[in-house]
Image (tube, rainbow, N blue to C red):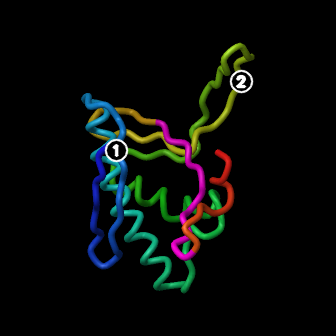
Amino acid sequence: MKERSFKARGAGSGYCFDVLRDDKGTRVARSLLHRVMIEFAKQSRSYFSKTGDHVYSYGERQLHSGLFPAFFNSADLAFFEPQILRKPRGGESGMGRMDYLVRDRGTIMLFEVKHGFHQVASGRLNGPAIGR
């Protein structure tokens, strides 16, 4: 596992733990997610400076207010909640939605966002991330 850090000028810094194998698609995704993390930090900082509140404090639906612009500004194309055909193992096919369809450098990626954040004071995960 590799630890990668990032700095978003005027908006802080963070870490990413990279456990993915190395291939072309992974390199494209890794580069995109690095840019998205920086852009999300900037979007979050902008939101906080205007409202005094954090966009990521409430849940998945509010998280999109900062995350979708981060994908949109970082990739060639970003599409919110595209319809997809889901086929669970051993189940029936049906229509569903993904959170994001993103294309960057010719690679198409689908993202499903889950909300959870680490409480610095308590050292524990908060809310929906527990038990997943």
Q: Position of residue 132 (x, y in %)?
A: 64, 45
Q: Residue at x 51, y 44 (%)?
A: 100
In this rendering, which labeled residue sits more in front, label 1 or label 2? 1
Judge from the rendering whether residue 31 lies leftward or rightward of residue 33; answer left or right. Answer: left
| Quarter of the image where one finds residue 58 | bottom right
Identity of the amino acid at label 1?
Answer: Asp
Q: Position of residue 20 (x, y in %)?
A: 35, 35
Residue 17 sits above or below residue 46 on the image: above
Nearest to the observer: residue 44 or residue 23 = 23
Nearest to the observer: residue 73 or residue 126 = 126
Q: Earlier in the sequence, mark 1 or mark 2?
A: 1
Q: Which residue is mark 2?
A: 94
Tell whether position 111 is magenta. Answer: yes
Q: Position of residue 5 (x, y in %)?
A: 28, 59
Q: Residues within 10 Å of mark 2 (few under 14, many from 20)?
A: few
**Secondary structure beneath label 1:** strand
Nearest to the observer: residue 14 or residue 54 = 14
Disc number placed over residue 18 in the picture, else none: 1
Considering every residue shown, the one lying at the far front of the view is 123
Disc number placed over residue 28 in the picture, else none: none
Q: Residue at x 68, y 48 (%)?
A: 131
Nearest to the observer: residue 39 or residue 17 = 17
Tell whether position 34 is magenta. Answer: no
Q: Quadrant of the N terminus?
A: top left
Q: Residue at x 55, y 76 (%)?
A: 121
Q: Which residues are magenta?
A: 110-121
**Secondary structure beneath label 2:** strand
